[in-house]
Amino acid sequence: MEPIIIKRSTDANIEASLGCLLGVSIPVILFLYAMFTARHKYDMIAYGIIAAGFLLPAFISFIATKIPLKAALKISDEGLVVSPSKSIYDSFAFLQKFTARSEKRLLWENIKEFRLVIYYKEYTMSPTDGTGSTSYTIPKYHLCVTDKAKEEVIFSIHGLEKTPDEILALCNRLLEEHTYS
């Protein structure tokens, strides 16, 4: 069987990221000009730090839309490999070799069952224009894997390329195939 790789969905909007980078570049250019024309060494350092503080987050956001993310879930004949990266910045593909120790490998012969658990997180927004606050609830999906020693591995599958129901159905189907083979 060819391994099935399910990646994180970034929902990256490259136009917005590029616009943010270009909008930030104007103050950065002004701070760099002030840095190079400053008469004192400490002023140069201060302007350089401020310019870097403006530029780095926008640059990282722009690069994040270009770099492919590493697999969050890899399903193969051997079993299941989960990668517990939480944000876009700690799941870049080139960082995969440094964070391989955080991956969890689960073999089919050790897996007893899969369950889907949904946690609801409530958020409240309070606008500044004097109108009332708005509350909304977002479901967070977790795949619970129970092994034969009654230990559970809980893995967040919120924000992946496939829906949580598709992931659960795929895992259950493959578990059934490997249990009876």
Image (cartoon, helix red, strand yellow):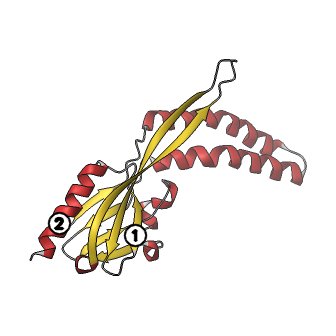
Circle 2 sits on which residue?
A: 174
- SS at circle 1: strand
Going by the picture, which residue comes out furthest to the front?
150
* Residue 64: x %, y % from top left: 47, 50
* Residue 165: x %, y % from top left: 26, 50
Q: Residue at x 71, y 45 (%)?
A: 51
Q: Label 2 is placed on what type of residue?
A: Leu
Going by the picture, which residue comes out furthest to the right?
40
- SS at circle 2: helix
Vertical order, 165 against 130 (above or below) = below
Earlier residue among tags 1 and 2: 1
Vertical order, 35 against 130 (above or below) = below
Q: Are marks 1 and 2 in contact (CB under 8 Å)?
A: no
Quadrant of the drawing holding the C terminus? bottom left
Please name whichever residue, 32 or 90, is drawn nearer the observer in this view of the structure.
90
Answer left or right for 135 relative to 171.
right
Q: Residue at x 21, y 70 (%)?
A: 76
Going by the picture, which residue comes out furthest to the left?
181
Answer left or right for 20 relative to 113.
right
Circle 1 sits on which residue?
A: 153
* Residue 176: x %, y % from top left: 15, 68
Q: Residue at x 66, y 33 (%)?
A: 26
Vertical order, 163 against 22 (above or below) = below
Please name whichever residue, 94 or 1, is drawn nearer the observer in this view of the structure.
1
Please name whichever residue, 167 or 69, is drawn nearer the observer in this view of the structure.
167
Q: Residue at x 27, y 75 (%)?
A: 111
| Residue density around tag 1, few if under 14, some if 14–19, many if 20 or more, within 10 Å | some
Answer left or right for 129 relative to 118.
right
Q: Label 1 is placed on what type of residue?
A: Val
